[in-house]
Image (tube, rainbow, N blue to C red):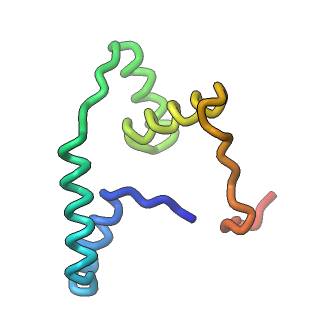
Amino acid sequence: MVRRDTATLLEDAAERIADVSRADLQIMLRRAALRLRNAAPVSLDDDVEEALRDLAGEFVVTRNDMISYIVREWMEKNTYLPVHEPDEDGDVDGTA
């Protein structure tokens, strides 16, 4: 299963606005409002910001996605979270 963030859902809805039900649009807008209300920037030292920006560029992801990835990896390696196993029934591209 692919995890889709609120921004992606909103962008997709904007592309096909005529096909989105009113109820689905209300849910997406409420989620977006909640995320905005609870958003707080993470302040880091300049050298950490630079390294983070470089990593995000290499992975072609946003700064927040990179922070989320790093935190998850650290928590899994330090046994605060169970190790994330890919679904056996998940999609594969057919290469080894």
Give how far across and how far down residue 80 sits, in percent. 60, 30
Q: In front: 20, or 79? A: 79
Q: Is residue 76 above or below residue 19?
A: above
Q: At 45% from the left edge and 22% from the top edge, which residue is drawn?
A: 51
Q: Position of residue 60 (x, y in %)?
A: 46, 44
Q: Is residue 20 left or right of residue 87?
A: left
State whether residue 72 is above or below residue 31.
above
Residue placed farthest to the right in the image?
96
Residue drawn at x 30%, y 57% is 7
Q: Is residue 88 left or right of residue 46?
A: right
- Residue at position x 26%, y 58% in the image: 31
Residue occupying the far bottom of the picture? 19
Image quadrant containing the N terminus: bottom right
**Residue 81 location, x and y as percent?**
60, 36
- Residue closest to the eye, 20 or 48: 20
Left or right: where does residue 83 sit relative to residue 43?
right
Q: Residue at x 68, y 54 (%)?
A: 86
- Quadrant where the C terminus lies? bottom right
Q: How far across and down, in percent of the image, does residue 10 sit?
A: 27, 65
Which picture quadrant has residue 76?
top right
